[in-house]
């Protein structure tokens, strides 16, 4: 009961979705996905990130900007450094939704199986 | 039926479910290919689905709607058929639709791939769902949790009438 309400509560509130297309675009690139992963545990400077990938610093900066636009990372100035943080909440939200989706599909597959047994028994093919 | 594995990948917003059945490949396929059978399991209890169009050809359109018991709540779905290879493979894309059935943003899509194959004497169905947005995920969940809402409502009604009885 509580779980079901949880589903309802989580699904219904409108999520700020201006960024959904940008989110997909941001996650469609392997380097950008890696930047998110690398910055989830601890912030890294743009110049550190620049040394991690076989591309120019400018190219890495562009990737970071795409991720900032999508809300997947944020940038903060620390002295002379620009630090990049992975936005844990955003990814956590995706995890939550995937968990709920699993529940939905498990229930749906139970119904699928019920219908499968009924039709097979009746010989409706 | 046994759900063998559920693999989710948050970074690419993908979920892969593998289920195994003792029935034949043809039997399992029929539950997708026959709209009268499809509508018996797609919608949650209390929110039966009605498939209006079911054109199982590449580029074809599948449309359905689900209504709640009082007719007040309605959920519309539109799929575009991307690939069909009966009886083993079907790929559809699910457009996010508004109440009137039109895509709400025109480009937020969910992709569902269904692969059915034999393993030993059993039939395996692999469902791969890929989302390109949080909105798409929420829409997919909303289509499936109506049963949760409905079950809660019924139970609440029962509890309320007990209290006032």
Image (spheres, coloured by chain):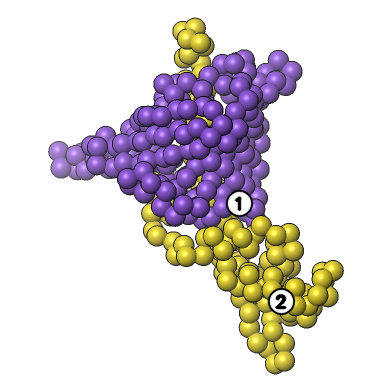
Answer yes or no: is residue B149 visible.
no
Q: Which residue does the image show at 68% across and 77% down from the upper left?
A: A84
Is A61 on the left or on the right of A125, as rendered? right
Q: Position of residue B25 (x, y in %)?
A: 62, 18
Q: Which mark is residue A23?
A: none
The secondary structure type at the circle numbered 2 is helix
Shade of chain A as shown in the rendered figure: yellow
The residue depicted at 44 percent of the width and 55 percent of the height is: B105
Q: Which color has been applied to chain B in this rendered view?
A: purple
Q: Is residue B112 above or below residue B118?
A: below
The residue labelled by disc 2 is A61
Looking at this rendering, what residue extends furthest in the top direction? A123
Residue B79 in picture, x, y percent from top left:
48, 38
Q: Nearer the viewer, residue B12 or B151?
A: B12
Single out the mark in the foreground, 2 or 1: 2
User: Could you tell me if residue B64 is visible in this image?
Assistant: yes
Assess disc 2: are there few (<14), some (14-19) or many (≥20) residues with their C-alpha within 10 Å of its C-alpha.
Answer: some
Q: Chain of mark 1?
A: B
Image quarter of residue A53: bottom right
Residue positioned 56% across, 49% down in the render: B131
Structural distance between the alpha carbons of marks 2 and 1? 24 Å
* Residue that mark 1 sits on: B13
- Quarter of the image with the N terminus of chain A is top left
């Amino acid at each position: 009961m509580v779980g079901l309400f949880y589903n309802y509560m989580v699904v219904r509130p409108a999520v700020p979705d201006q960024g959904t297309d940008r989110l997909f675009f941001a996650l469609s690139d392997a380097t950008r996905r890696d930047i998110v992963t690398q910055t989830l545990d601890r912030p890294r400077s743009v110049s550190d990130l620049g040394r991690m990938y076989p591309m120019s610093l400018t190219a890495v900066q562009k990737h970071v900007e795409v991720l900032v636009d999508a809300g997947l990372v944020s940038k903060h100035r620390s002295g002379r450094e620009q630090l990049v943080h992975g936005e844990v909440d955003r990814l956590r939200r995706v995890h939550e939704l995937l968990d709920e989706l699993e529940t939905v599909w498990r229930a749906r597959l139970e119904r699928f199986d019920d219908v499968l047994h009924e039709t097979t028994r009746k010989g409706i093919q | 039926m046994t759900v063998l594995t559920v693999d989710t990948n948050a970074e690419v917003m993908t979920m892969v479910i593998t289920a195994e059945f003792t029935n034949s490949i043809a039997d399992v396929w029929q539950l997708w290919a026959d709209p009268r059978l499809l509508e018996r399991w797609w919608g949650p209890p209390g929110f039966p689905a009605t498939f209006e169009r079911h054109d199982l050809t590449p580029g074809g359109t599948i449309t359905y709607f689900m209504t709640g018991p009082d007719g007040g709540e309605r959920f519309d779905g539109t799929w575009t058929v991307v690939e069909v290879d009966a009886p083993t493979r079907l790929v559809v894309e699910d457009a996010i639709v508004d109440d009137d059935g039109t895509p709400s943003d025109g480009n937020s899509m969910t992709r569902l791939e269904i692969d059915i194959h034999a393993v030993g004497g059993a039939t395996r169905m692999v469902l791969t769902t890929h989302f390109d947005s949080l909105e798409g995920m929420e829409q997919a969940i909303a289509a499936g949790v109506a049963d949760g809402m409905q079950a809660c409502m019924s139970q609440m009604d029962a509890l309320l009438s007990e209290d006032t009885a």
